[in-house]
Amino acid sequence: MYTELEELKQQCHEEILRLEKQIKIARGRIARGRFPFRFDAKAVIQKAEVKIEKIQSLLVKLESLSEQITPVVNDLKEIVGLNKVE
């Protein structure tokens, strides 16, 4: 379960980097006048920024939940005689 959470976090961080790169490219095209329509570039930038905000918000929630789950899992493992979670 924890490896899946870490993989998901890593994928989210990679997606944020990809979206930030997409924003930089769109802004560069606006500055050079290479985007067919300026409002198209603005829409691309706005959508990417919204996605980044949502991902970051959900990552914060996920981290909070992870912190709450770990003690419960540790207690259960202690009761049944398994090793504790790190």
Image (cartoon, rainbow, N blue to C red):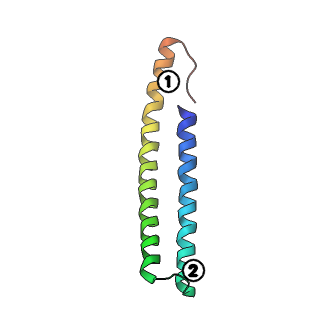
Query: Mark on residue 85?
Result: none
Q: Nearer the viewer, residue 25 or 40?
A: 40
Residue under the point 46% across and 55% down: 56
Q: Count all numbered tags in the image, as a single digit.
A: 2
Q: Image height check: is 25 above or below 55? A: below
Q: Of the residues under marks 2 and 1, which one precedes in the sequence?
A: 2
Across and down, in percent, residue 31 comes to 54, 85
Q: Image height check: is 47 above or below 38? A: above
Q: Residues within 10 Å of mark 2 (few under 14, many from 20)?
A: some
Q: Nearer the viewer, residue 44 or 53?
A: 44
Across and down, in percent, residue 43 comes to 42, 73
Q: Amino acid at mark 2?
A: Gly
Quick one: which residue is furthest to the top in this view?
80
Judged from the image, the secondary structure of the residue bearing numbered disc 2 is helix
Residue under the point 47% across and 25% down: 73
| Residue at image mark 1 | 74
Q: Nearer the viewer, residue 16 or 64?
A: 16
Q: Amino acid at mark 1?
A: Asn
Between label 2 and label 1, give the one nearer the viewer. 2
Q: Image height check: is 17 above or below 25? A: above
| Residue at image mark 2 | 28
Judged from the image, the secondary structure of the residue bearing numbered disc 1 is helix
Quick one: which residue is furthest to the front in this view?
36
Residue under the point 46% across and 60% down: 52
Across and down, in percent, residue 59 comes to 46, 49
Q: Look at the numbered discs 2 and 1 and tell me whether their residues touch, using CB distance below 8 Å.
A: no
Q: Residues within 10 Å of mark 1 (few under 14, many from 20)?
A: some
Across and down, in percent, residue 82 comes to 55, 16
Residue under the point 52% across and 39% down: 5
CA distance separating discs 2 and 1: 50 Å
* Rendering quarter of residue 40: bottom left
